Amino acid sequence: MTHEDFRPRIENSDRGITLNKSLAWSILGSLVGAGIFIGMNLAGLEKTSDDNKTLSRANEIRIRAIETQQARQDEKFNNILGYLTRIDARLERIEQGK
C-alpha cells in the first residue's frame, strides 16, 4: 500500500445541485432577506421615534402652559377667598354692633 491509497478520492461531486447546496443557498437567501427586512423596519422605527419625540415636546409645552394657567387660577381663587373672609368679618362686626 502506498501513500496514495490512503488519500481520499475526490470525484466530481462539486458539479450539480445537491440537497446540501440547495439548503445552504436557501438559508443564506433567507438570512439576507431577513437582514434587509430588519434594516427597513429599523429605519421606520427611527422615523417613528423622531415623530414621538416631536409630539412629546409639543405635549410638554402644552402641559407647561396649562400648569401656568392653573397656578394663576389658584392664586385668583385664593384672593377671592381672602376677600370673602374679609367681607364675612365685616358683616359679623356690623351684626354685633346692632
Image (cartoon, helix red, strand yellow):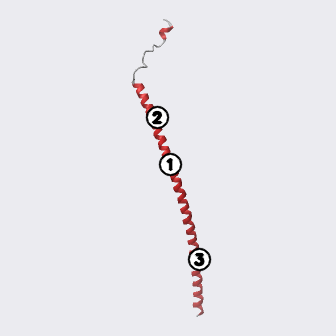
Marks 1/2 in contact by CB < 8 Å: the verdict is no
Task: Check disc 3 and report the residue beneath it.
Answer: 79
Q: Nearer the viewer, residue 56 or 47?
A: 47
- Taking the spot 48% from the left edge, 46% from the top edge, the residue there is 44
Which residue is labeled 2 in the image?
32
Q: Can you give x and y, in whole percent of width and height, for residue 46 in the image? A: 51, 47
Would you say 76 lies left or right of 15 here? right
Q: Secondary structure at mark 1?
A: helix
Q: Secondary structure at mark 3?
A: helix
Q: Secondary structure at mark 2?
A: helix
Q: Outermost residue toward the bottom?
A: 98
Q: From the viewer's perspective, is residue 49 above or below residue 36?
A: below
Q: Earlier in the sequence, mark 1 or mark 2?
A: 2
Amino acid type, label 1 = Lys
In the displayed structure, 70 sits above or below 53; it is below
Give how far apart the Cα atoms at labels 1 and 2 are: 23 Å
Q: Count residues near mark 3 (Cα–Cα under 10 Å), then give few for <14, some for 14-19, many for 20+.
A: few
Q: Earlier in the sequence, mark 3 or mark 2?
A: 2
User: Which numbered disc, 3 or 1, marks the residue that appears first in the sequence?
Assistant: 1
Residue assigned mark 1: 47
Question: Marks 3 and 2: which is nearer the front?
Answer: 2
Residue 40 screen position, x and y as percent: 47, 42
Which residue is at a point 53% across and 55% down the rendered structure image?
54
Residue type marked 2: Val
At label 3, the amino acid type is Asn
Question: How far apart are the alpha carbons under marks 3 and 2?
Answer: 70 Å
